[in-house]
């Protein structure tokens, strides 16, 4: 079992109470850009008035995480998130935040979790931020 699998299993088993990021952890059910397979990616989700924001930081690595390409290719998918004390599945649409809105979004995220500000210092790439907006099905 890999690290992602262990994080997801613990998140589900504990109803979202046992994990490194606490209530901020969400699980992306990203759809592979090349394969079409569903991949489970535990990430930090920053709640806002529109849903959640996620950062394709990969810890400040020089390249984007694989799920970045999946969200670009297949922006409609589901997430698992802790909502009102319960892990629920939410259908969402991902939109990459660009331009001046990116500066505002990334600044707010770095203010809330300072290590994300440090990731910008470790790489030359502009670290993408996605808005995940719930949708009705």
Image (cartoon, rainbow, N blue to C red):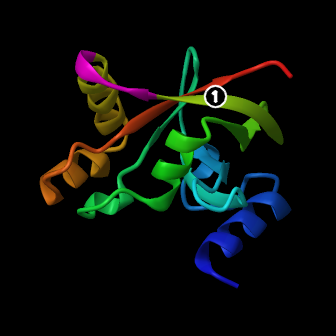
Whether residue 85 is visible to the viewer of this picture, yes or no, is no
Q: What residue lies at 31% left-to-right and 24% top-to-bottom?
A: 98
Q: What residue lies at 33% left-to-right and 61% top-to-bottom?
A: 59
Q: The N terminus appears in which quarter of the rendering?
A: bottom right
Whether residue 91 is visible to the viewer of this picture, yes or no, is yes
Q: Is residue 59 left or right of residue 117?
A: right
Range covered by the magenta-colored residues: 96-100
Residue 98 on the magenta span: yes
Q: The C terminus appears in which quarter of the rendering?
A: top right
Tell which of 69 and 136 is nearer to you: 69
Question: Which residue is identified by label 1?
Answer: 93
Q: Quadrant of residue 41?
A: bottom right
Q: Residue furthest bottom?
A: 1
Q: Residues within 10 Å of mark 1 (few under 14, many from 20)?
A: some
Q: Is residue 130 left or right of residue 27?
A: left
Q: Is residue 49 left or right of residue 101?
A: right
């Amino acid at each position: 079992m890999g690290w992602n699998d262990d994080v997801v299993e613990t998140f589900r088993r504990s109803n979202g109470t046992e994990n490194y990021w606490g209530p901020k952890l969400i699980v992306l059910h990203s759809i592979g850009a090349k394969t079409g397979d569903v991949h489970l990616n535990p990430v930090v989700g920053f709640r806002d008035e529109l849903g959640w924001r996620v950062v394709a930081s990969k810890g400040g690595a020089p390249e984007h995480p694989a799920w970045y390409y999946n969200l670009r290719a297949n922006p409609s998918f589901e997430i698992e998130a802790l909502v009102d004390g319960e892990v629920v599945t939410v259908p969402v649409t991902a939109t990459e935040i660009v331009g001046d809105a990116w500066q505002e979004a990334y600044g707010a995220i770095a203010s809330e979790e300072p290590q994300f500000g440090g990731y910008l210092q470790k790489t030359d790439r502009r670290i993408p931020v996605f808005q995940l907006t719930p949708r009705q099905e």
